[in-house]
Amino acid sequence: MSTKLFIIGTGRCGTHTLTMILETVPNTCSLHEGRGNYLGKEIDVEDIKGLNLYLYYCSDRETALNESYKLSGKTLEIIENNFTSRHNLIKSLSENNVHFCEANRQLYNYINYIYDKYPDAKFIHLIRNGYDCVRSWFPRGGAYPESLSLYDLYDRSDISFKKRLKLFKSFSLKSKEQNKSSIENLSNKKYLDEEDTRRLCSQNSYYQYDKPLPYANDKWANQWEGFDRIQKISWFWQYTNSLITERLKQIPSSQSMVLRLEDISPEKIREVLRFAELPELFSIEAIKAHDRRDSSSFEWIDEWDGWTKEKVNKFNGIAGNCMDQFGYKLRL
């Protein structure tokens, strides 16, 4: 029986590094955020950011969140649309007894759906020291930019003209100026209505909008608007890792494991492969850091003056408990 392994984390936590290792495992097709190479053939099953846009920007967010757990309603429709290409690939690989692995920072809200579709799937919660992860996210302009409006989706995204035109057509408008006006009108809303959000989800992925926002019951919800980027990214790190933990509790413990990036070693990788029931063969050379810094697709912010006392205090106040939970030491 072929393995189906899903590696889930916050991003900037080592998903690319782990993919590079898994790519050297025999009889295995390994993807990083939907893309990879198998037997010399490029594979692209597309990214899956649409679900987060819907869950965190939809005006009826509580309903959308509940639907994501119950696998029902419009949320399930978006999930199914996102996963069609993956299902087809997994089916093809399984028929040929080839293992499937994917490391993807967008998978955390798909965990129960994946388990529902593939009850034998294995999950790895990949986590990285919060200070290092926040530091790595901070230069990336897509991580809670200071100013974010729906017009940015048109003006600053890395999507092609062809895809932009498809987006325009989804609003049933005929000109760039009309679309600019329409998108600016939408950006005046605190949250998009369901139909607007579904349209955007179904068309393209937008890295500026793929990060979570606090729900009303989050302890930091009332302070969110006053947070700076350090605080927002710190919240993102702790929220996402806590959410992954919560969702993984709903599947058998024998089918999930926690892997800290700092613990990766040849023996740890062998342990991962045994857990995933993959061949215990891999390239030792693949165990090294890989930073996919693509300046053509992202706006970069270089304003970083180190972990000052102020930044440490901001991080600790928000994410300190999560650091303790995963065995990381706090800076003081």
Image: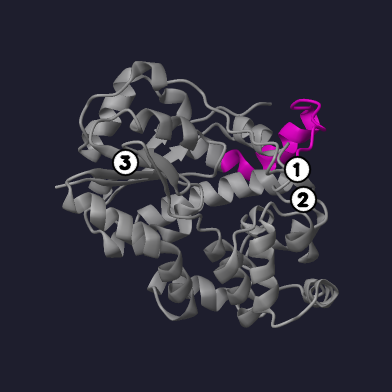
Q: Determine the CA span between mark 3 and mark 1.
A: 31 Å
Instruction: Please say if 149 is above or below 237.
Output: below
Please give the range of residues in magenta: 299-321
Q: Is residue 249 magenta?
A: no
Residue that sits furthest to the left in the current view: 1
Residue 284 lies in what quarter of the image?
Answer: top left
Residue 178 tag number: none
The answer to whether the residue labelled 2 contacts the one labelled 3, judged by CB atoms less than 8 Å apart, is no
Q: Which residue does the numbered mark 2 point to in the structure image?
A: 145
Residue 29 tag number: 3
Taking depth in this image into account, of 327 and 270 the one nearest to the observer is 270
Q: Which residue does the numbered mark 1 point to in the structure image?
A: 299
Name which residue type carries label 3: Cys
Q: How is the image coloured?
A: one colour
Q: Residue 60: x, y in percent? A: 61, 79
The answer to whether the residue labelled 2 contacts the one labelled 1, judged by CB atoms less than 8 Å apart, is yes
**Element assignment for label 3:** strand
Q: Determine the CA span between mark 2 and mark 3.
A: 35 Å
Taking depth in this image into account, of 271 and 101 the one nearest to the observer is 101
Name which residue type carries label 2: Pro
Name which residue type carries label 1: Glu
Residue drawn at the location 69% of the way across and 54% of the way down: 208
